[in-house]
Amino acid sequence: MHIYADNAATTALSPDVLKAMTPYLTEIYGNPSSLYRTGAVAKDAVEAARENIAKLIGAKSPAEVYFTSGGSESDNWAIKGVCKVLKAQGKNHIITSKFEHHAVLHVCESLAKEGFEVTYLDVYSDGLVRPEDVKAAIRPETALVTIMYANNEIGTIQPIAEIGKICREAGVLFHTDAVQAMGNVPVNVTDDSVDLLSLTAHKFHGPKGCGALYIRRGVRIANLIDGGAQERSRRAGTENVAGIVGLSKALEIAIDTMEERREKLTKMRDRLIDGLLRIERSRLNGSRECRLPGNVNMCFEGIEGESLLLKLDLAGVCASSGSACTSGSLDPSHVLLSLGLPHEIAHGSLRLSFSDSNTEEDIDYLLKVVPEIVDYLRSFSPLWDKIKSEN
Amino acid sequence: MAYSEKVMDHFANPRNVGEIPDASGVGEVGNSKCGDIMRMYIKVEGNVITDCKFKTFGCGAAIATSSMATELIKGKTIDEALKLTNKAVMEALDGLPAVKVHCSVLAEQAIKAALSDYYTRQGIDPTPIVGVIKECDHDHGCGCEL
Ligand SMILES: Cc1ncc(COP(=O)(O)O)c(C=O)c1O
Ligand code: FES
Ligand SMILES: [Zn+2]
Ligand SMILES: [Zn+2]
């Protein structure tokens, strides 16, 4: 048995995407900035991808889409770029949430060292930012609101359109990290009143190392990467042509198949959640209703997440406990702590995230092995002994 | 971060798991907030540790170091067990990733805690013999209250 249940960390490259990319990794190797034919063909491919992506995310013009190296760069550019411009106008306040990805939180921390004040909004026990909290936090000196579209660990989908409306009315710029949401739920920058949006290809069966930042026309932003005149002089560097073509193709497929996938995955997800909740002292982390179709995140009291993952790995299951970049650190994830979970419970978390390639048989197998492993680890857990004796 | 084959072997097939109902000493270290608790049971006959068992809540390395530590002291004299260092446990496991070194410290401390309990039960002050048991020796770095 081999089950890949870590699609929130990254996804398999789709064969159709690879097929679309291959010519740009082989015969069409020209530099898009060159004048001769093979360069021009590459340039056309980049511009066709830009147009396609603009359409898919509801942008008004392809000129609002900028290619980057992925989600982390897009987040860095959006936040640092806007804050640099607005700081000069005396704006030195950022509003974000406690459970953003590190690509947002660490940028905010670094800006705090440069004199920015950062408000970290609570996400409550359901893992949802409250639009009224955003409204209450906005001040005259607020430069930017940055709230993720969907959380990478617990999959909760934020009320982005409401937050966008509040920001637009207050005249404050709004960035959203839509890395996890893109291709899984409908995202439309115009309907959602978003000014800047980050996305990355490898979360929807595209290649790694290629993403985009949507920048609404009229938003003033400083460069993050200076150099050549690519991306209309806003993001230097020879274009990752094959990656850009792959990003465009992957997003198109993801959005075309979103509705049927949502139906299938939601059914699988709910069956798994219901089954795992039968385990004594287990809980689902984050809202069940406002949740990505493929995300299950649970805590099992009395056991520790890493040993659970290792046992699952031995049973042929790839899963995660907290976000991929957090593993290797000793502390429970900031996301689970932000829900108000105590440390000892947050340590025992498991994230299973699914894609179209997962099957009902995968769910059957997980419903068999996860309870067995939890039982086994609890059988020699002194913490479990204590929990049991307290009742 | 990757574990050695030895660590994975002791994680997948931990030795000496369980309790000793009539233990001569029981020691527990770590705390649940940290994500590791180790409890060691020892049976002492004469001067020799004839049996040793453990129960651990923790990561793969915590389980593997507990298992290895029990193997290293079983059948040994108390004096030998007192000399067991976290380094020896790590070496026996062909090393641990840097972030997991504290787990081996915890295993060393758990044995000392069990020996400490053994002496206390004998009416002997353990501190001069065993030393002070540290509960948690690392900095979490996350800024959380602990
Ligand atoms: C919410 C979120 N933002 C940003 C990133 C970073 O994206 P990338 O790996 O493309 O830099 C990830 C995933 O790793 C993510 O889940
Ligand atoms: S986490 Fe290992 S001893 Fe505290
Ligand atoms: Zn800890
Ligand atoms: Zn902490």
Image (spheres, coloured by chain):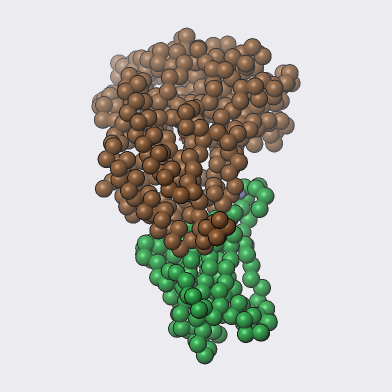
Q: Is residue B128 left or right of residue A371?
A: right
Q: Which residue lies at the image location 35% right of the left edge and 22% below the top edge?
A: A258
Q: Quadrant of residue B9?
A: bottom left
Return the residue found at the far front: A391
Q: Is residue A284 left or right of residue A208?
A: right
Please determine whether, in this image, residue B117 is positioned above or below residue A281.
below
- Hue used for the chain lettered A: brown
Most foreground residue, A340 or A306: A340
Instruction: Give coordinates of residue A193: x percent, y percent.
Output: 55, 14
Instruction: Give coordinates of residue A102: x percent, y percent.
Output: 55, 37
Please determine whether, in this image, residue A48 is positioned above or below residue A236.
above
Res A68 seen here: no
Q: Which residue lies at the image location 51% right of the left edge and 22% below the top edge?
A: A197
Q: Which residue lies at the image location 66% right of the left edge and 73% below the top edge?
A: B132
Please determine whether, in this image, residue A121 is positioned above or below residue B115.
above
Most foreground residue, B70 or B100: B70
- Hue used for the chain lettered B: green
Return the residue found at the far top: A60
